[in-house]
Amino acid sequence: MKYADFTRLSVTTKDRIATITLERPETLNAVDAQLHTELRHVFRLVADDPDSDIVILTGTGRAFSAGGDLAWLQSMIDDPSRFTGIIEEAKQIVFSMLELPKPMICRMNGDAIGLGATLALCCDIIVASETARFGDTHVRAGLVAGDGAAVILPYVVGFMRAKELLLTGQLLSADEASRMGLINHVVPADQLDAKVEEISSRLVRGATQAIRYTKIAVNRGLRKLAQDQMDVLMTYEALSSQSADHAEAVRAFREKRKPQFTGR
């Protein structure tokens, strides 16, 4: 796969900075089957790109990413084999982000929810608009939080806070997430680009090898955790994807009402 093959995201490079942009603004950059596949490949391609040293990950429109696309989730309820088919893909998204040697800045232009929260957490520095929200809401959709945040959150905020966030599916304001150490910088929306440019320019002027090897060393623990835990987490998420509660959650979201969970 090449950059030109992508239809759900774009990659542009300027002054040795590669910008990956999720391109589904009509769905708040929700991830469907095609975008999921493209995310599996894009970080490996950027890692091998000789024209960039720094990476920015962002979304187009008013959200960073709202998580899983409802129609895609419904298709996997209807045909369980489709979820089984994405287990390895989901693991590769997380692994490829944590193994990317180039520093990656999340330009969190809006909400980062569900898988969107995982994508943000797998970056090295998060700069968020003050109106953005952050949260892994898998359990609110009747799903196990299997796609990576459950690996990283305890590492960042500690086990007790992480369990509360994951078990309740709580959404945090950007300021709340910043106070927990989940977000590096919170700025007004009209200052987001300037702050991202300030950090990316500082990095691109730095000692490239020293920066890369420092990231690789610091991420070693996260990489080991992901390798150890993702198989179990994704297996449990696959199991929960066939629960009555998950089917009810997807129906409720599409009907714009609160789900009525039964524990089945």
Image (spheres, rainbow, N blue to C red):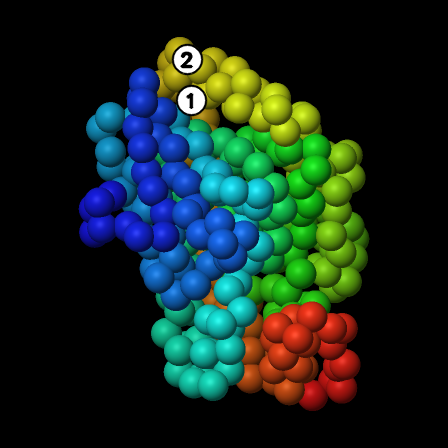
Determine whether the residue tagged by mark 2 lies in a helix, strand or loop: loop
Query: In this view of the protein, which residue sits in the foreground, 107 or 152?
Result: 107
Query: In this view of the protein, which residue sits in the foreground, 1 or 29?
Result: 29
- CA separation, marks 1 and 2? 7 Å
Is residue 214 placed above or below 25 in the rendered structure? above
Residue that mark 2 sits on: 206
Task: Locate the C terminus by quadrant.
Answer: bottom right
Whether pointer 1 and pointer 2 mark residues with C-beta atoms closer than 8 Å, the reply is yes
Badge 1: how crowded within 10 Å, few (<14), some, or many (20+)? some
Please state if 51 lies on the left or on the right of 144 as rendered. left
Is residue 192 placed above or below 120 in the rendered structure? above
Q: Is residue 169 visible?
A: yes
Which labelled disc corresponds to residue 211?
1
Identified by mark 2, the residue type is: Gly
Residue ID at (36%, 25%): 17
Q: Residue 194 in the image: state x and y as whole percent.
A: 54, 18
Q: Residue 259 in the image: state x and y as whole percent.
A: 73, 76
Q: Nearer the viewer, mark 1 or mark 2?
A: 2
Q: Is residue 220 visible?
A: no
- Sequence-wise first label, 1 or 2: 2
Identified by mark 1, the residue type is: Ile
Q: Residue 44 in the image: state x and y as whole percent.
A: 30, 45
Determine whether the residue tagged by mark 1 lies in a helix, strand or loop: helix
Q: Residue 178 in the image: state x and y as whole percent.
A: 72, 34
Residue ID at (51%, 64%): 69
